[in-house]
Image (cartoon, helix red, strand yellow):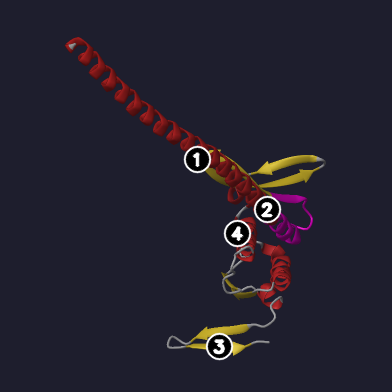
Amino acid sequence: MADIEEIISSFNNLNERIKLLTSQYDELDDKISALTIKSENLIKARWTIVEVQKMTQQKFKERMESLVTLAIKSVFDKRNYEFELIFEEKRNQMEVKPVIHEWIDGIKYSYDSLEDDFGGGMVDIVSIAMRIVLWSMEQPKSRNVIILDEPGKNLGAMVNLFGKMLREISHKLGFQLIIITHDQEILENGDCAYLVTHDKKISHVELMR
């Protein structure tokens, strides 16, 4: 009789153990299902973010390239230049490299060291144009005033075209340029000009036109 009671007790213990393990299995199965759904949602979300990032990057790239190319061609009107932004993923980070292409007799030449290949004049044009594009894409936009200190000082005889380009872009995009310069040709392209002198004590401002 004792053996039967022990068997029954063992059976009951095992049955309770089975119930406990079944309950734990169901809980783990529910967690696995929830994690699977979460993983699938994260994959979908990641895909969506990547696609939105690609669309945003492409929109930014097109806007930047078109305006910077326009600015370059406005100054270097005798040369067939085109500006391009090249995106490269390095060490899990996206890097952007500005490149200028030039077509000569049907052959494309590419330059990715702007200052070394073209000098400070080209760097001036590209950096100012990029700054303007970034401002134009701000949401919400900051104040529509951009200050430039001695721009185009390395452009030599092309500085007049540079001044016209600045004037045209500022009028087209609706922002004000305040330019500090000693270059008469840039002054002539301004809507108004002031002469600032200093007598070692105070500054004097005179309206030139």
Q: Residue at x 74, y 59 (%)?
A: 70
193 or 38: nearer the viewer: 38
Measure the alpha-carbon separation of dots 2 and 3: 43 Å
Which residues are the magenta region? 64-83
3 or 1: tag closer to the N-terminus: 1
Residue annotated with mark 1: 38
Q: Is residue 81 magenta?
A: yes
Q: Which residue is mark 3?
A: 205
- Cα distance in 3D space between marks 3 and 1: 66 Å
State the mark number for residue 59.
2
Front: mark 4 or 3: 4
Tell me if mark 2 has few (under 14), some (14-19) or many (20+) residues whose alpha carbon lies within 10 angstroms of its own: few
Residue that mark 4 sits on:
127
Q: Residue at 77% across / 52% down in the picture?
A: 79
**Residue 35 image position (x, y, % from top left):** 46, 37
Determine the main secondary structure of the stretch shown in magenta: helix
Cβ–Cβ below 8 Å for labels 2 and 3?
A: no
